[in-house]
Amino acid sequence: MLSRVADSLYWMSRYLERAENTVRQLDVTSSLMLDPGGASAEIRWQRLVASLGNPPGLNWQGDFDSMAHKLVFDDENHACVTSSIDLARENARQVREEISSEQWQRLNRLYHQIHAPEAETQFTANPSDFLSSIIDGIHLFKGVTDTTMIHGQGWQFIRMGRYLERCYSTATLLEVFQPELLGLPEREHSGYQYLEQVGLLRCCTAFEAYCQVYTADIAPERILEFLLLNSDFPHSIRYCVDSALDALESIQRASARRPSDELRSAIGRLHAMLGFTTVGEIIEGGSASFLHRIREQCMTIHEILYRYYVQYSIQSALTA
């Protein structure tokens, strides 16, 4: 596969995953604002921005609604939802011949929906409905992708982008919430803390799935265990790493180049970190540092993947 094709499919997938993550976290944060006994709007906004990686240009300016509008529609800010969808569409356009007509049509509908003249009015009138419709559009694109595209190298690069982005964003989210999960035992059973913990699960679409495994007894250690180590839940870090490893192995089997031992080793280390530990050991060793190492390893994997499959020289390809 040409490096430009792999690059565009990979980033198309990452940007759509990023848009979905931003929309969902904003929607959950907005609903938590309805609790008058919880944290202030400023604190919740700061936590939201931290969960998104502290992108610039989103400092608190006194009004949550106007800040939420900026996070969705401010095209000058690369962290906003419209920017992520624009970049996903542009990457798809560059490899139009590699994706199905259904994929292109679905992504175009999403693009025109968020850029429609009435979009900002709809968001102001009912933010939750508008944000839910964006998530629905992204879900439809993912479904169309899985059912209309050949499951070859291109599809595997889409999976790789999706699961690396999701792994990184979930680790960032958990790292931001970690002090409230494990650092405030005296508030563990308060109504405020319960709502915050349910909000964290909802940020990962995990509340119902968590209840199926643990019942509705919300406990910080169980939340950490579920979102870190559960191998069956699609938004858990363990599941994302397993899926990224599977995608890499498929890419390497189909590639004419010699498999990259460095890349396989990088994902393998992350896989081993999650596969041979318990939540008790993670907490005892420091959950914040564990989550930070996961994020660092995700960045390392991205750098190696990019160097080996996108930015490689002709000479290295000939000798590989």
Image: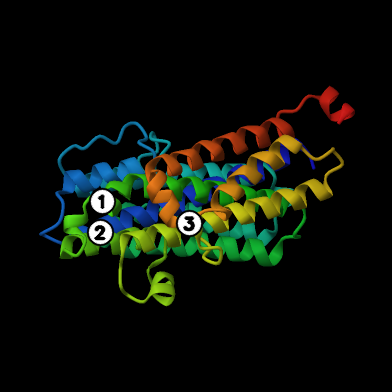
Q: Residues within 10 Å of mark 3 (few under 14, many from 20)?
A: some
**Alpha carbons under labels 2 and 3: distance apart:** 24 Å
Lateral position of residue 77 relative to residue 242, left or right = left
Amino acid residing under circle 2: Glu
Q: Nearer the viewer, residue 124 or 34?
A: 34
Mark 1 = which residue? 180
Q: Nearer the viewer, mark 1 or mark 2?
A: 1
Q: Which residue is mark 2?
A: 196
Quarter holding the N terminus is top right
Name the residue that disc number 3 marks. Answer: 278
Q: Position of residue 101 (x, y in %)?
A: 68, 59
Quarter of the view holding residue 113: bottom left
- Residue plotted at (53% across, 46% down): 165
Which residue is more in the foreground, 317 or 185?
185
Kindly report which numbered mark, 2 or 3, lies closer to the viewer in this rendering: 3
Q: Secondary structure at mark 1?
A: helix
- In the visual, does 116 lie left or right of 255? left
| Residue 282 drawn at (x, y percent) | 43, 49
Query: Label 3 near label 2: C-beta < 8 Å?
Result: no
